[in-house]
Amino acid sequence: MSKEKRNIATKLETESKYLTNILDQDDVKDFKKLIPELQDTWHKKQMFRTETEMRFSVLNDYKHPTKASKYWQCVREQNVFLENLMSLSFDYRRTEVKIKRLQQKLEQEEDPIKRELLQIDIDEKVYGKASMQLVARDRMREIKLWSKFKKQFDDGSFDTKDVNTHQLNSYHLTMKNKAETLTQGSSQPEVFNVLGQLQSIERIKKENGQIETTKKPVLPGLTSKG
């Protein structure tokens, strides 16, 4: 998909003549002068997460402490964007058909008011197509980045076929990290949830012979009074 395909400069120029309905003449003149800048702004605006945000926010070390957990989160994220891209493709195809139908109606319509309304609907959907093209480009950007991350994390040390394989160890580390953030000010449901999951994971690992002892987690700063 070329940049020209997502070019809305012509659409902005066409629509600018109708802005006199809602803007003063001076504002319309300023708008026309700004069209090249507005096209650039529209083209480079941030839509989804940047690579930096993906690395420190989605794949943060506390929530995903192992390469395996990071890899499988990449799989989840990539699949979400794949599903969204496919849905967007269907919407785009549907919009193209709707435009054809509107154009047919416009050719057959004789009433000038109805023709004007049909043309507005066509212009709106054509602009919508350009927006969908922009969204598709950015979704594909994220899909490619998640692929890049998957390759970086896949060092051959974990199972990349079955997500369940790594989870006991990864969740154990995650719950330990969460337990470290608990304080006496943490709510009872929060403490119950974190420590309950941590104790259950350690019990399962002990039953599997993966750990020898299970220590009862203690809240930071919690001391007994005697």
Image (tube, helix red, strand yellow):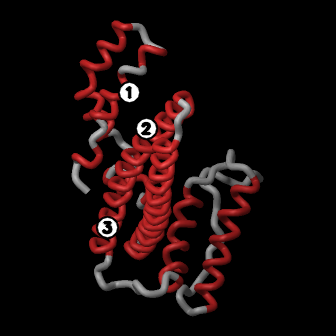
How far separated are the C-alphas under marks 2 and 1? Answer: 9 Å
Q: In the structure shown, which secondary structural element does the residue marked by tag 3 occupy?
A: helix
Please tell me which residue lies in front, 42 or 152.
42
Q: Which residue is mark 2?
A: 123
Q: Amino acid at mark 1?
A: Glu
How far separated are the C-alphas under marks 1 and 3? Answer: 42 Å
Whole-percent x and y of residue 86?
Answer: 45, 66
Q: Earlier in the sequence, mark 1 or mark 3?
A: 1
Q: Which residue is mark 1?
A: 15
Position of 225 with respect to 111 (left or right) is right
Mark 1 Cα-neighbour bin, 10 Å: few <14, some 14–19, many ≥20: some
Q: Amino acid at mark 2?
A: Asp
The answer to whether residue 63 of the structure is visible from this angle is no
Mark 3 or 2: in front is 2
Q: In the structure shown, which secondary structural element does the residue marked by tag 2 occupy?
A: helix
Q: Is residue 183 above or below residue 209?
A: above
Q: State yes or no: discs 2 and 1 in contact (Cβ < 8 Å).
A: yes
Mark 2 Cα-neighbour bin, 10 Å: few <14, some 14–19, many ≥20: some
Q: Residue at x 51, y 34 (%)?
A: 115
Q: Earlier in the sequence, mark 2 or mark 1?
A: 1
Please tell me which residue lies in front, 30 or 44.
30
**Quadrant location, the N terminus:** bottom left
How far separated are the C-alphas under marks 3 and 2? Answer: 40 Å
Q: Which residue is mark 3?
A: 149
Q: Amino acid at mark 3?
A: Phe
Whole-percent x and y of residue 7?
Answer: 27, 41
Q: Residue at x 31, y 78 (%)?
A: 154
Q: Residue at x 41, y 68 (%)?
A: 74
How many numbered tags mark residues here? Answer: 3
Mark 3 Cα-neighbour bin, 10 Å: few <14, some 14–19, many ≥20: some
Q: State yes or no: discs 3 and 2 in contact (Cβ < 8 Å).
A: no
Q: Is residue 195 above or below residue 43?
A: below
